[in-house]
Image: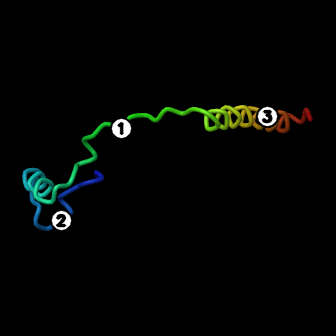
């Protein structure tokens, strides 16, 4: 089901009715607008790098634990 699916309303029978409804109510169909990726910088970028390092270290420790090395 799309984010804005007009067929769930009783008075909208086809796509043309849905387009007319959007124009009449002055709504935007956000499913047709492409989403742009946000630029990550500053402390957020540092936090994600630290999180990746932490995940890799935890995976190595889990593998070593299952192999009974440590």
Location of residue 50 (image quadrant): top right
Marks 3 and 2: CB-CB under 8 Å? Answer: no
For disc 1, the marked residue is: 35
For the point 10% across and 66% down, the residue is 11
For mark 1, does the 10 Å Cα neighbourhood hold few (<14), some (14 to 19), or many (20 or more) residues? few
For disc 2, the marked residue is: 9
For disc 3, the marked residue is: 63
Q: Which quadrant would the C terminus be assigned to in this image?
A: top right
Q: Nearer the viewer, mark 2 or mark 1?
A: 1
At numbered mark 3, what does the secondary structure look like: helix, strand or loop?
Answer: helix
Q: CA distance from mark 3 to mark 2?
A: 53 Å
Viewed as shown, does residue 31 lie left or right of 52?
A: left
Looking at the picture, tell me which residue is in the foreground, 60 or 20: 20
For the point 89% across and 36% down, the residue is 68
For the point 77% across and 38% down, the residue is 58
For mark 3, does the 10 Å Cα neighbourhood hold few (<14), some (14 to 19), or many (20 or more) residues? few
Marks 2 and 1: CB-CB under 8 Å? Answer: no
For mark 2, does the 10 Å Cα neighbourhood hold few (<14), some (14 to 19), or many (20 or more) residues? few
Residue farthest toward the right in the current orientation of the protein? 70
Q: Residue 69: image x %, image y %?
A: 91, 32
Q: Residue 67: image x %, image y %?
A: 85, 34
| Mark sitting earlier along the chain (3/2) | 2
| Mark sitting earlier along the chain (2/1) | 2
Q: Nearer the viewer, mark 3 or mark 2?
A: 2
Count of numbered tags: 3
Q: CA distance from mark 3 to mark 1?
A: 38 Å
Viewed as shown, does residue 18 lie left or right of 69?
A: left
| Mark sitting earlier along the chain (3/1) | 1
At numbered mark 1, what does the secondary structure look like: helix, strand or loop?
Answer: loop
Marks 3 and 1: CB-CB under 8 Å? Answer: no
Residue farthest toward the bottom in the current orientation of the protein? 10
């Amino acid at each position: 089901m799309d984010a804005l699916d007009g067929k769930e309303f009783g008075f909208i029978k086809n796509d043309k009715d849905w387009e007319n409804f959007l124009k009449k109510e002055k709504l935007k169909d956000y499913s047709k607008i492409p989403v742009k990726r946000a630029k990550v910088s500053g402390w957020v970028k540092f936090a994600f790098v630290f999180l990746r390092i932490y995940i890799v270290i935890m995976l190595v420790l889990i593998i070593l634990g299952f192999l009974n090395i440590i």
